[in-house]
Every structure is written in C-alpha cells, then in structure tokens.
Image (tube, helix red, strand yellow):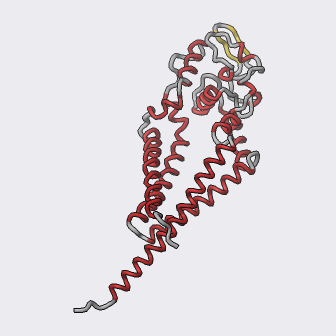
Amino acid sequence: MALPYARVFVVFVNSIYVFLLLGLVGVALSVYIMKITSPLTLYKGSVISDINRAITATGLGPEGYYDDSDLVTFVSGFLLVVAVAGLFVLVVALAGCCGGCCRNSGISKLYVVALILMLVVELIMIIVIYGFNNTLMWGSIKSTMTTVVMSKYQGLVGNNTETFGWNFIMAKYQCCGVYGYSDFKEASAWRSDVVAGGTPYSLSVPIVCCDQLPTSTDLSCAGATTGINANKGCFDELWKLSVGSLPMALLGLGVGVCLQIMLIIASCDLSSKDKKRIHSHSEDASYPVKK
C-alpha cells in the first residue's frame, strides 16, 4: 500500500538528523581530539573556579590548581562514546536520505534493518534501566563508582583524574560520594587528616561535600556529618537529572520510538515502490522498439 508523502517524510526527518548529528559529533571530536574547551563552558559553569578558590583559601594548594584540561581528560571517555555512537547514527541517517533521494531499494532495505536493530536495542535498554534499575547494570555501575571513591579519591587536592572528577561532580551537583559521606569511611587514598592555617583537622567528610565551600582556613564544615550535601548521594542526583524523571523520559522515549516506527513503515513502502519501478523499467526495456 502506497503511503502519501512517504519519501518527503523520510528525507526530511533524516536530513534533520544529519544536521544535528554533524554538530554533535563535531563538538565531541573537537573537544576530544583538538582539546577545544569552549563547548564545555556552559556545562562547567563556575565549578572549577569555585573549587580553585576553596583550595587557595584553605591554603591546601596553589592558585589555579585545576583547569579546563582536567575537565577534558575527565570527560574524554564519555566524549568518545558520544562521537562513536553519533557517527553510527549519522551513517544510518545518511542511508535513509540516500535511499529516499536516489530511489534505491537496496539502501532503503539496509536502512530499515538498521532502524529495527536500533529499536530492539533501545527497547532492551528501556527494560533494563526502568525495570531493573536497582540490579544488573545499575548495580554494577554503582559498585564501580564506589570502588573508585574508596581507592582513588584523594581529597580537595589530588593528582589524579578520578579525584578531580569526583570533586567536580560533588561541587556541581551538591552531593557527596555515590550514596553519601559514608562512602569515604574506608577510603584508602583520602587524606582526612589535614592542616589548614596551622590548625590540624580530622575530616569526617570531604571538604567539597560542605554545603558551602570554605572561604578561609576554617574547615569545621567538613568535621560534621550533618550537612545537607554530605548526606546526599551523587548517583541519585545524576539519575534524577538524566533519565530519572519517568514522565519526561517516557515522553521522550515514546516520541522517539514512534518516529522510528513511522520511518520503518515509510522506508518499507519506498523500498517496495522503488523495486517495482526498477522491475517495470526492465520489462519496458525488453520490448523491441518499432521502426
């Protein structure tokens, strides 16, 4: 059954995808390969500056201890995943455009197969994320994050990417550890005994978990475990900000899945029509021309 405007729909939607994906992949690769930090400006906000001010005020490190290069190193793995996934989807979108514009039945079929495979993967991910969010994948992620906190985190001032990453996350999202300050009780690399302004402190929570980052050598905020941020786990905060809002997530996923199904149906229709057109032309060419 022929669908009206199917070709226009497929080409138009995939053209938008190509435009958006070129921008996304371009930004990810420019930051990952060329170390251009300007695309991260909106995301980082004043977090790095706030942490550096706290380091200087407490006397625990020199001015400008962290910079944008630390953030690039921290998010490089995520950027690589975004770039690879974006390139894959970009190729699929280009196939959709080519299949529709060039009236190529074979390319349209490959496009449909790719969409079906993507749809199956998405449905599996939805089931795993929302059906088993406390086990399987999320349980493994939480365990890995906790292991990094306990074995790599050094404190407000550190010399590894993991320390900067956790300081950045905890300061930006005003949280502490994976589950809360208790994650740091057995942290092997965390320097909980520090001296600021000549006064020794035995910290109960990391300094960056204070409700307000210190502006002097007074670190008493890190000596108590009653702070709001200290009792707020970062995993839950990140979950809420990403896919934890079920109504919004379902709305977005629903629109995306419906659009994919419509593209599959329209592309199947185009493939069938283009195949019949080629077959019809072949038959016409087989008849002898009258002189």
Q: Quadrant of residue 15?
A: bottom left
Considering every residue shown, the one lying at the far front of the view is 4
Which quadrant of the figure contains the C terminus? Answer: bottom left
114 relative position to 225: left or right: left
Count of all numbered marks drawn on residues in the image: 0
Residue, far top: 198
| Relative image position of residue 213 (x, y in whole percent) | 63, 17
Of the pair 272 and 184, the residue shown nearer to us: 272
Residue farthest toward the left in the current orientation of the protein: 291
Establish if 127 lies above or below 102: above
Location of residue 113 with respect to 183 vertically, above or below: below
Q: Position of residue 73 (x, y in %)?
A: 52, 35
Lateral position of residue 228 relative to residue 70, left or right: right
- Residue drawn at the location 76% of the way across and 45% of the way down: 134
Front residue of 82 and 260: 260
User: For this view, does 34 lie left or right of residue 188?
Assistant: left
Which residue is depicted at the point 68% across and 33% down? 234
Q: Is 30 placed above or below 61 here?
A: below
Q: Residue at x 77, y 21 (%)?
A: 225
Q: Quadrant of residue 273?
A: bottom left
Give the x, y percent position of residue 226: 78, 20
Query: x, y percentage for residue 168?
Result: 59, 28
Residue at x 43%, y 59% (from the top left corner):
11
Picture layout, residue 151 above or below residue 113: above
